[in-house]
Image (cartoon, rainbow, N blue to C red):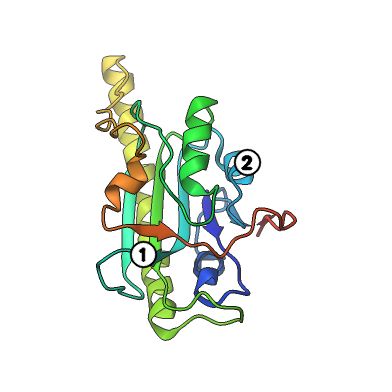
């Protein structure tokens, strides 16, 4: 499953939906493509118990480091530790909250990969800036690699279980400090999820 998070009418915040558009006709038939505004319950509904969920979203820099529009950050998570405290976010609920809530409800995918694209312009309007447009193609190719790698890994695990009868659980990630979630710890430079969404907007999530 690939989930493009964003608002196509706030310039670079449409990066997630744009990546999903690039992937149409390029992913295996059983890989679902979803576009959503990022409201946590809708994210959870989309990815619940999926073998692999890939989320694409725009991010903005709000710290001492200068922005790098078009730069891509990739985070992969197999299972969460115990540190699921909420971090500060300029737009209230979002991906970080969805992860914490899904963990509490046991509705996480088996593997979650996040591709975050740094935005240059989040104002009203349509069309991505050139740097983000270029990043969209890079992320689409990376997601195809993620899907292929996930399937290869699943095949190898299946072969291993047939020969040994054991279950490979893999290493757990290091728990995040109290009050700080894994994603925000990973983005230590305060690159925050885009504030372009509005939780009061109607649900515009759609399968494509």
The residue singled out by tag 1 in the image is 62
Q: Residue at x 42, y 48 (%)?
A: 88
Label 1 or label 2, whichever lies nearer to me, is 1
Which residue is at the far bottom? 130
| Front residue of 99 and 30 | 99
Q: Residue at x 34, y 39 (%)?
A: 180
**Residue 21, image x and y in percent?**
56, 69
Write down the quadrant of residue 175 in the picture. top left
**Residue 61, image x and y in percent?**
36, 66
Which residue is at the far right? 202
Horizontal side of residue 158 vs 174, given as left or right: right
**Residue 159, image x and y in percent?**
31, 28
| Front residue of 196 and 19 | 196
Q: Residue at x 36, y 74 (%)?
A: 70
The image's mark for residue 83 is none
Residues at marks 1 and 2 touching, judged by CB atoms closer than 8 Å = no
Write down the quadrant of residue 167 in the picture. top left
**What element does badge 1 sit on?**
loop
| Front residue of 89 and 94 | 89
The residue singled out by tag 2 in the image is 41
The crowding category of the residue bearing disc 1, from other C-alpha atoms within 10 Å (few below 14, some 14 to 19, many at least 20), is some
Horizontal side of residue 158 vs 171, given as left or right: right
| Front residue of 40 and 157 | 40
The crowding category of the residue bearing disc 2, from other C-alpha atoms within 10 Å (few below 14, some 14 to 19, many at least 20), is some
Q: Is residue 161 above or below residue 204?
A: above
The span from disc 1 to disc 2 (Cα, nearest Å) is 26 Å
């Amino acid at each position: 499953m690939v989930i493009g998070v964003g608002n196509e009418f706030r310039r670079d915040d449409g990066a997630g939906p744009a990546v999903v558009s690039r992937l149409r006709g390029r992913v295996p038939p059983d890989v679902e493509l979803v576009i959503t505004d990022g409201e946590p319950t809708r994210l959870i509904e989309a990815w619940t118990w999926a073998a692999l969920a890939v989320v694409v979203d725009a991010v903005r820099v709000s710290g001492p480091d200068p922005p790098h529009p078009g730069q891509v950050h990739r985070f992969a998570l197999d299972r969460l530790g115990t540190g699921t405290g909420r971090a500060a976010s300029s737009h209230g609920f979002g991906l970080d909250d969805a992860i914490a809530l899904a963990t509490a409800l046991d509705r996480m995918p088996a593997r979650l990969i996040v591709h975050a694209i740094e935005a240059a312009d989040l104002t009203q309007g349509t069309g991505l800036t050139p740097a983000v447009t270029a990043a969209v193609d890079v992320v689409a190719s990376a997601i195809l690699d993620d899907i292929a790698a996930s399937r290869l890994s699943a095949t190898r695990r299946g072969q291993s279980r047939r020969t040994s009868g054991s279950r490979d659980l893999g290493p757990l990630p290091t728990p995040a400090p109290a009050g700080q979630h894994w994603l925000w710890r990973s983005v230590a430079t305060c690159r925050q999820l885009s504030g372009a969404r509005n939780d009061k907007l109607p649900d515009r999530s759609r399968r494509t």
